[in-house]
Amino acid sequence: MECACVYESFYPVMIYYLNRLKDWGLYFRQCKVCSRFFLAKSQRYELCSEKCRKAQSLQNKRDFDERARENNYDLLYKNECQNWRNKINKAKKTDAFPEEKLKEMKNSFEIFKKEALQRKKLIHTGKSSAEEFMDWIYQQGNIIVELTRK
C-alpha cells in the first residue's frame, strides 16, 4: 500500500506517481482516433482500443481507395491482387487441386506483391512511369492463369 501526503502543492504527488508509472513501464498517450488519454505499455501505441484500431483501419482503406481513384495504376494493382486472391481461393475449394500447385500459386502471389510494391516506389521517385507499371501488371495476370491450368 502506498500513500502520499499533500501539504501545499500537488506537484510532489504528481512527480511521485509519474515515477511509479515509469517504473511500471506505462506511458500516457493520446489516441489519434478519439483523442482520449490512456496508459500504454509503449510510447509507440497510438490507439486506445480495438474499436479505435478498427476505425483507423477503415480510414486507412478509405484513404487508399481515394488515392487509387486518383491514379489508375493503384486501382489496377488492387484489382489484380483481388484476381489472384479469387483464383487461389477457388483452387483451395477445388477438391482435386494439388496442394503443391496451390503452394506455388501462393508463393507466386507473394513474389508478385513484393515486386509490385518495388515498382510502385519507382513511380513515386520518378524512375519509372505508370504506363510501364500497368503494362507489367497486365503481363502478371497471365502467370496466375497459367498456374491454374497446370
Image (tube, helix red, strand yellow):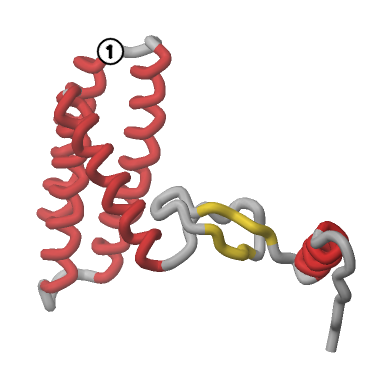
**Which quarter of the figure is the C terminus placed in?**
bottom left
**Residue 78: where, in percent of width, then height?**
20, 40
**Which residue is located at x 16 percent, y 70 percent?**
97
Which residue in the structure is indicated by mark 1? 129
Please identify the quarter of the rendering in which residue 34 is found: bottom left
Please identify the quarter of the rendering in which residue 54 is found: bottom left
Pointer 1: residues within 10 angstroms few (<14), some, or many (20+)?
some
Asked if residue 128 lies left or right of residue 40, the reply is left
**Which residue is located at x 59 percent, y 55 percent?**
29
Q: Nearer the viewer, residue 7 or 133?
A: 7
Asked if residue 111 lies left or right of residue 150, the reply is right
**Which residue is located at x 38 percent, y 10 percent?**
126
Q: Count the numbered circles shown.
A: 1
**Which quarter of the figure is the N terminus placed in?**
bottom right
What's the residue type where badge 1 is placed?
Ser
Please identify the quarter of the rendering in which residue 129 is found: top left
Q: Is residue 150 visible to us here?
A: no
Q: Nearer the viewer, residue 64 or 17?
A: 17
**Residue 123: where, in percent of width, then height?**
34, 18
